Amino acid sequence: MTEITKEIKSALRTIMTDKNVKIPLAIESGSRGWSFNSTDADYDCRFVYVHDINWYLSVFSEGKKDTIQNITQSDNDTLDLCGWDLRKFLQHLVKSNVSAADWLQSDICYLYDEKVVILLKEVAERYFNPVSASWQYLSLAKKKYAQIAINPKTASIKAYSYVLRPLINNIFIEQFNQIPFASFQKNLDAISLENSGNPEELRQAVNRYIEIRRGNTEWATMESDETLLNFIREEIPRQEERIKGAKFEKIHEHSCADEVFREIIEIVWDGENKSHEHK
């Protein structure tokens, strides 16, 4: 176990004690969770926390805080810990929020209660809306590409990741109709790039970009790559046209999420169970 992992787990234990909550899931998000972080990337720990049943049964539960934020500095590393209350997390899963779904796909886990995660994944998969998820990813790609387009020759390496990842994720959704992996590399390896002019050249360019990102600092710039830029310019309108024509019937009943909500509270507080720490 690395020193930074020890510090993150220690911070999570402190949160559980100070806030009187349980944390059944804590993962690494951001570029480290996506498997293509820069050399000086922050540690972005995201977690789901659960209050005891009495907290949720309060007459004045509306307006209670549903987020815990804790940003600390450790030597040269910034530890950004942010957690969502179970109710908030489930609400976002029901809405097919891509950030919430992404937490459940992370390969880097600090705390992990298998029973709870299985239940959360069932909710995520049941309510997954490929059209809504695709719009969310496309919106992010368009917003970040607008920043690159101002001057592609001086764009940061990081900016490209916030365009390429959502576009690759959208292709994954298009081809598999499933929640994408958190890992950018896994999604890239899984998809076909046949809609691009030269699939092999594009795949090489994206893999080359991954190596550049991993070997540089967070805000380093890179020379404009015409293969990547052409892909982005063509894929954004193609995805927009695809999503406009896509149909999906939403699930409007929430009984499944309600049942999972109650079951998870019981699981994490029954006998003061602790979530399993991943080494």
Image (cartoon, helix red, strand yellow):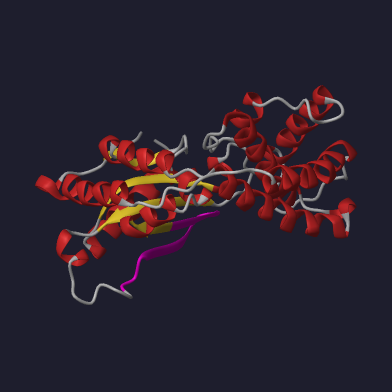
Is 103 drawn above or below residue 145 in the view shown? above
At which x and y percent is residue 260?
Answer: 26, 46
Q: How many marks?
A: 0
Residue 3 seen by the camera: no
Q: Which residues are magenta?
A: 64-81
**Residue at x 81% of width, y 22% of height:** 200
Horizontally, is 256 left or right of 269 in the view? right
At which x and y percent is residue 104?
Answer: 43, 41
**Residue at x 12% of width, y 47% of height:** 270
Horizontally, is 221 left or right of 79 in the view? right
At which x and y percent is residue 95?
Answer: 46, 54
Residue nearer the viewer, 52 or 242: 242
Outermost residue toward the top in this view: 200
**Residue at x 72% of width, y 33% of height:** 211
Residue 186 seen by the camera: yes
**Residue at x 79% of width, y 26% of height:** 204
Quadrant housing the C terminus? top left
Q: Residue 66 magenta-drawn?
A: yes
Residue nearer the viewer, 5 or 89: 89
| Chief SS of the magenta region | strand
Q: Residue 249 magenta-drawn?
A: no
The part of the image, by quadrant, that contains residue 215 is top right
Residue nearer the viewer, 101 or 238: 238
